[in-house]
């Protein structure tokens, strides 16, 4: 069976922990989009890890970990992550990288950094990982698919010159900096291609064969619905689709093979980067939630910068689950709310005197105010509980109200950072 694990909100919902948990039953784990601009935090018997590119199945010795063609493949970061986890005692993962995956080039990161600096106060809040320039080049048809690296020097140099002519015009005239070192870029390509050569293959063929053989395939999404370039809070979005359906495009298999879509949503809200966030809170209230939240606080796995935080948003989450095609909802970090006397939940948006229950477009969203329903807190530690009925009644009331509001079944409740801090709820 093919199962997707994706985010309902702005990212940082706890997808890495859910993927790592579900990978116990998987034969294949696939990263199908995005790049090193967001991370997954995983806690297991080997320790605590922040993965940015490597699939979360890397900690399971019998899992094949696949990078699909839709990813922004950063060779250096990927291989450094592999080295980092194996140095901590994790067995070398099984890896397959699509020969059609496009490569993050050094100048993509450079352009991302230069553009954010140029925009200054009007920047997009980029992690400066090169994502927007990478996808821009991909769709401008001047990107580099991985198989292209294995051509003769003269063919590589011809393309380098063609791309560098375009890039140098911007570097010199817009950013007032140095041109691309073309010989240096050729040497970089020749170095990096040797590092990944043993892992390259035909991902589409592999996955289609795995489906025929009845293997369990887990699709791992990055970020969440609000960051989708078509359905999210454009333009403050990412540059590839974090929707479950995109996995079939990235990996070359039929969309109807995705039988289960687990959409992850956190028991409160958080976001990294700029963009509309109706239920965001500020000041001391935000600082308390930020420091109680996550595993060691709500700070970006990639950047380390403080995440924006807010109360649970039923309007955004209902939309996120619908667009993703949720069959199941995983409700994470419920344990982090045990310190609160009262817990607000955003149940609607006030916009020009009316209450919106459906998520609007960005130009309307910026003028929306949250409408809250307040719940009493359960004021205790719920970590270690394995059965849903053993959760405090006030905690169950909170979960079941949100389930009713979003209209999708909450079948997984995460009540701690570790792999076994999980409650399966029969629906």
Image (spheres, rainbow, N blue to C red):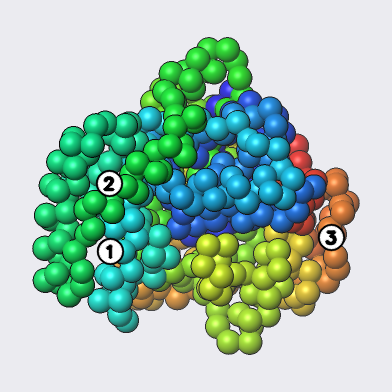
Q: Which mark is residue 186?
A: 2
Q: Is residue 182 visible?
A: yes
Q: Secondary structure at mark 3?
A: loop
Badge 3 or badge 2: first in the primary sequence: 2
The residue singled out by tag 1 in the image is 111
Examine the rendered structure and indicate whether residue 275 appears above or below residue 225: below
Circle 2 crowding by C-alpha within 10 Å: few under 14, some 14–19, many from 20: some
Left or right: 88, with 200 as reference point: right
Q: Secondary structure at mark 1?
A: helix
Q: Secondary structure at mark 2?
A: helix
237 and 310: which is toward the camera = 237
Residue pictured at 28% horizontal, 51% vertical: 185
The x and y percentages for residue 52 are 53, 53
Q: Quadrant of the C terminus?
A: top right
Badge 1 or badge 2: first in the primary sequence: 1
Frontmost of labels 3 and 2 is 2
Examine the rendered structure and indicate whether residue 423 appears above or below residue 397: above
> Residue reaching furthest top?
213
Circle 3 crowding by C-alpha within 10 Å: few under 14, some 14–19, many from 20: many
The residue singled out by tag 3 in the image is 382
Q: Is residue 231 visible?
A: no
The x and y percentages for residue 68 are 43, 35
254 and 34: which is toward the camera = 34
Circle 1 crowding by C-alpha within 10 Å: few under 14, some 14–19, many from 20: many
């Amino acid at each position: 069976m093919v199962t997707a694990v994706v985010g309902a909100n702005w990212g940082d919902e706890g997808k890495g922990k859910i993927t790592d948990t579900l990978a116990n039953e998987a034969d294949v784990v696939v990263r199908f989009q995005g790049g090193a601009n967001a991370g997954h935090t995983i806690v297991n018997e080997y320790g605590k890890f922040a993965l940015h590119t490597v699939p979360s199945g890397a900690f399971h010795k019998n899992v094949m970990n696949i990078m699909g063609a839709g990813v922004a493949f950063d060779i250096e970061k990927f291989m450094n992550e592999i080295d980092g986890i194996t140095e901590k005692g994790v067995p070398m993962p099984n890896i397959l990288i699509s020969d059609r995956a496009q490569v993050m080039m050094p100048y993509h990161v450079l352009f991302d950094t230069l553009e954010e600096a140029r925009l200054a106060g009007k920047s997009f809040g980029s992690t400066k990982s090169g994502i927007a320039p990478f996808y821009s080049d991909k769709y401008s048809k001047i990107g580099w698919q991985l198989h292209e690296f294995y051509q003769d020097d003269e063919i590589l140099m011809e393309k380098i010159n063609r791309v560098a002519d375009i890039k140098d015009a911007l570097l010199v005239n817009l950013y007032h900096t140095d041109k691309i070192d073309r010989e240096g870029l050729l040497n970089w390509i020749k170095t990096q291609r040797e590092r990944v050569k043993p892992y390259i293959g035909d991902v589409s063929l592999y996955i289609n064969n795995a489906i025929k053989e009845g293997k369990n395939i887990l699709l791992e999404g990055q970020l969440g619905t609000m960051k989708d370039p078509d359905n999210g809070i454009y333009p403050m979005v990412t540059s590839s689709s974090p929707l479950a359906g995109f996995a079939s495009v990235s990996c070359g298999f039929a969309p109807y093979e995705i039988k289960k879509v687990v959409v992850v949503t956190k028991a409160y809200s958080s976001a990294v980067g700029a963009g509309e966030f109706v239920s965001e809170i500020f000041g001391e209230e935000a600082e308390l939630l930020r420091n109680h939240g996550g595993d060691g606080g709500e700070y970006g796995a990639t950047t380390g910068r403080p995440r924006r935080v807010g109360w649970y948003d039923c309007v955004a989450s209902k939309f996120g689950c619908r667009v993703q095609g949720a069959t199941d909802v995983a409700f994470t970090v419920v344990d982090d709310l045990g310190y609160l006397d009262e817990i607000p939940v955003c149940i609607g948006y006030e916009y020009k005197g009316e209450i919106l229950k459906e998520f609007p477009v960005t130009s309307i969203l910026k003028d929306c105010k949250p409408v809250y329903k307040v719940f009493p807190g359960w004021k205790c530690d719920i970590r270690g509980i394995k059965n849903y009925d053993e959760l405090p009644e006030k905690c169950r009331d909170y979960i079941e109200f949100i389930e009713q509001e979003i209209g999708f079944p909450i079948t997984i409740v995460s009540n701690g950072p570790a792999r076994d801090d999980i409650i399966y709820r029969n629906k």
